[in-house]
Image (spheres, rainbow, N blue to C red):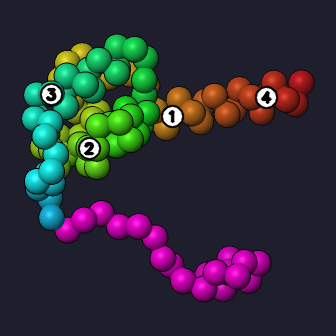
Amino acid sequence: FLNMVRMHSNGKGISRSSLPYKRTPPTWLKLSTAEVSKLICRAAKKGSTPSQIGILLRDSHGVAQVANVTGAKILRILKLNGLAPEIPEDLYHLIKKAVNVRKHLE
């Protein structure tokens, strides 16, 4: 099966980025756990999804992995503060895609 996948591309490896082995926050990061949690809650109140919040923290504030800094993932922090979305993000996007396909077929 793997051979069929690679038959139509020039790639031969399974190269990808990997998470760092050390699970401690980097020494150069000046944000505390409470500050990161506050940033997450503020972004969620503006209507950002958990993955958008992760991208915002990574690009604007230098937080590579929220779980390494706070000890909890973004969604768990949102659930603790009552800001988690009603339906999971991946399911929401699947529903959205199905609606767009149905609209296209009509």
Q: Quadrant of residue 69?
A: top left
Mark earlier in primary sequence (2, 3): 3
Looking at the image, is 17 positioned above or below residue 56? below
The residue nearer to you, when weighing 63 against 66, is 63
How far apart are labels 1 and 2 at the CA level? 26 Å
Secondary structure category for the residue under label 2: loop
What residue range appears in magenta? 1-21
Mark earlier in primary sequence (3, 1): 3
How far apart are labels 4 and 2 at the CA level? 39 Å
Q: Which-is-in-front pick, marks 4 and 2? A: 2
Q: Which mark is residue 91?
A: 1
Q: Which residue is mark 3?
A: 35
Tag 3: amino acid: Glu
Q: Which-is-in-front pick, marks 4 and 3? A: 3
Q: Position of residue 86 (x, y in %)?
A: 39, 20
Tag 1: amino acid: Leu
Secondary structure category for the residue under label 1: helix
Residue 61: within the magenta? Answer: no
Residue 56 in sight: yes
How far apart are labels 4 and 3 at the CA level? 43 Å
Tag 4: amino acid: Arg
Q: Quadrant of residue 19?
A: bottom left
Q: Which mark is residue 106?
A: none
Q: Residue at x 28, y 44 (%)?
A: 62
Q: Which-is-in-front pick, marks 3 and 1? A: 3
Looking at the image, is 97 positioned above or below residue 64? above
Q: Which mark is residue 63?
A: 2
How far apart are labels 3 and 1 at the CA level? 29 Å
